[in-house]
Amino acid sequence: MITTIAELDRIRDDSKRLVTTRSMMSAGAAVVPIPGADIVADIGLLTKLLPEISKRFGLDHDQVKTMEPQLAQQALVMASSLGNTMIGRMVTKRIVAALLRRVGARVAVGSMAKFIPFAGSAVAATISFGAMKLVGNSHVEDCYKTALALLPADQRALAKV
């Protein structure tokens, strides 16, 4: 369990670097000129990325199950108030697909851009990178805020949110 704001800040920074790395992988998959290949790759990447981020913050499904009941409830309520349905829950391909629908316009434009000769692949890669970064960093920030709410009061006072 995270006990200091310094540890929480380090985890957030490390997680954002991980999101950038996975976003580059998503961009690489978007260059492949096969319709839908990028979406399949993004679902696979996010199905692994989101639980990994949650775990770093002590908020994955198994970790929340082992918390004191009051603390677990607090974590789930905080996550829910942020609109995050993945903190403390099992992340499935179906949930990730629903999440991608939220950024669907970008993903659809990226998929269609592949059909534009030469520049289309670059456009698709850029859009895919941006969409993955948006989803990943949003989850990092939600996990950060949730974990921050679980810190002792003296540590919460030191936070720069």
Image: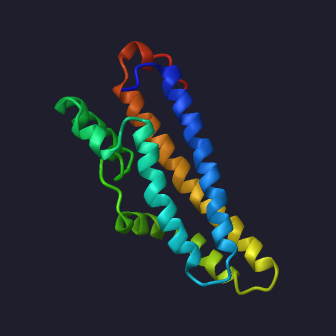
| Picture coordinates of residue 3, whole percent (x, y) | 40, 20
Relative to 105, residue 146 above or below: above
Relative to 81, residue 4 above or below: above
Q: Is residue 145 left or right of residue 62?
A: right
Q: Is residue 37 left or right of residue 55?
A: right
| Picture coordinates of residue 57, whole percent (x, y) | 42, 36
Farthest top residue in view = 154
| Picture coordinates of residue 7, whole percent (x, y) | 50, 24
- Residue 151, picture quadrant: top left
**Residue drawn at the location 24% of the way across and 30% of the way down:** 71
**Residue drawn at the location 27% of the way across and 39% of the way down:** 64
Could you tell me if residue 33 is visible in this image? yes
Q: Nearer the viewer, residue 32 or 9?
A: 32
**Residue drawn at the location 34% of the way across and 43% of the way down:** 60
Relative to 139, residue 129 above or below: below
- Residue 24, picture quadrant: bottom right
